[in-house]
Image (cartoon, grey):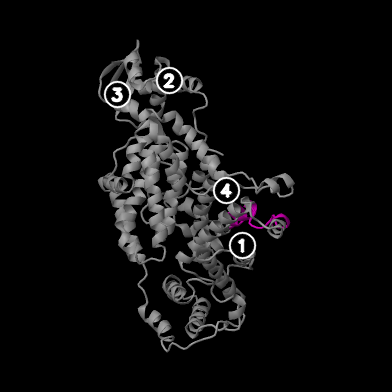
Amino acid sequence: MNYEEDIDITNEVDLVVSAYPVQDDDLDEELLAADQSAQQYQEIQIPEVVKKFILLFHRSVLENNVYELQSIYEHSFNKLTEKFYANESWPEPEGISSLVNDDQVFLTLYRELYYRHIYSRLTPTIEHRFHSYENYCDLFNYILNSEGPVALELPNQWLWDIIDEFIYQFQSFCNYRNRIKNKTKEELALLRDNSQIWSCYSVLNVLYSLIQKSRITEQLLVSKNGGDMVEAAGEYGSRPLYKMLGYFSIVGLLRVHCLLGDFTLALKMMDNIELNKKQALFARVTACHVTTYYYVGFAYMMMRRYADAIKAFSHILTFINRTKQYHTRSYQHDQINKKGDQMYALLAICVTLCPTRLDENIHSQMREKYAEQSNKLAKPEEALQVFEELFLFACPKFISPNGPNLEDPEVVEQGVAFEPVQHYTKIFMAEVQHSILLPTLRSYLKLYTTMGNAKLASFLEIEPEQLRTLLMMAKMRSRQIKWVEGTLLEGEYQGTSDLDFCLKQDMIHVSEAKVGRRYGDWFLRNINKFQDILGGLELSSRA
């Protein structure tokens, strides 16, 4: 990691430290003290402390008191959840409407938390899934279709969680819809008659509409060119609610397009977001920061740009390590840790396919978590199974834009639907299959400066012609598009290996990469010929 990258991460850490809310202990003590009398209440009643919490919550929303809302949202709500609703749902919105004077805006926000709690702690029914979707429609219609900007301010963390949860529930519904087995006739009928619920079109429409309404793309473009974002904000984009929802929707679309398997379009969404910019907007919310780098790194990996994927994963894992003492105070601590473990697994995969020197701390953490798997990845006879296990653990849960045809009796009877995760696992494993001998080949090449083709073929227990193909593949894999500047999709062909080689008259000549660069340049000029020879080995970056 170079000095400039280290400075960037330091700035991001400082931003987390300065922006992390000071827990309002007085508020929590006041709320919890109200229940210290330990009065017994009937099941149909709402505890007095919860009533007071809802009244305080409602008042803070009406007053647009963002600071108090942040403490309520991140601390008080979760403490009351653990105390009263760890294994059951919060009071139904209809049951608290009289407490808040039937304020529909507040009830819509409350329902968002109500259904999110059910998804995280309980098992949502099909009715919960439908009603949650309808509530999101109400919320986004209020924000997007009111006459003029709405008078509502929410903490950045909650705004990110709204977008994040909206996409998560869409993803969850797609996977639920694909599991036809064990569904009752009533459930199948509801799915068949409500095909527009959680449709891919409606989800994408919401995210693109938020981006358009906020003019966030224009704002980011002005900022990228050195201007002031306010110049392009407009009536809606000048409001923090619209600006941040629009910005988080860009990161949301990065995620959705990755889930749909369109990795090129996923990175295209990030054209106007500069990952290396100091104090970027996504760094204001740690979960957004981690999500951004996870999906950028994963998209790069699936496009076979392993060097860029390694750089993305290494950067965010360093950030997580430096701020872990703050994560323990966050209600999203477990989620961040899990995402970190997944990125270490993806990093182990990428480093095996594209050997790279890592930061010492990152390397030691990766070895600590995946030492056994890393050793097996270097052994062709064991590597395939480990590659698949790590990929299945660390990849996003892909979705299909269209559900199974429930009008077809045969599909319903067999209970078999398209499995997106298995589909993309097969695509990735096809790429790995072609590269499985490369680590072993590399280990032999590092031992010699010249070596006969037949001799190396005998070491690898393959035919000389197979070795020739393997060498050409290794040469092609040693040069990748690497990001230098511009958008994330841009880059230059560069060598990624610390050694180079050429095959001349059945003799393999090996040298350090800087000495053998002319062979790489010759290969680059003739790359189309090699791709014809190796037809079918290129991993598509699109579904």
User: Disc 3 vs disc 1: Cβ atoms closer than 8 Å?
Assistant: no
Q: Is residue 540 left or right of residue 366?
A: right
Sequence-earlier tag: 3 or 2:
3
- Disc ID at residue 469: 2
Give the CA distance from mark 3 to mark 2: 15 Å
Q: Is residue 261 left or right of residue 6?
A: right
Tag 4, which secondary structure?
loop
Query: Label 2 amino acid?
Result: Thr
User: What is the chief secondary structure element of the magenta stretch?
Assistant: helix
Total residue callouts: 4
Sequence-earlier tag: 2 or 1:
1
Query: Label 3 amino acid?
Result: Leu
Give the CA distance from mark 1 to mark 4: 17 Å
Sequence-earlier tag: 2 or 4:
4
The x, y position of residue 187, in whole percent, is 68, 59
What residue is pinned by disc 4? Answer: 399
Q: Is residue 324 left or right of residue 417?
A: left
- Disc ID at residue 445: 3
Query: Label 1 amino acid?
Result: Arg
Q: Quadrant of residue 495?
A: top left
Tag 3, which secondary structure?
helix
User: Magenta region: which residues?
Assistant: 191-209
Closer-to-camera residue (298/153): 298
Tag 1, which secondary structure?
helix
Closer-to-camera residue (451/276): 451
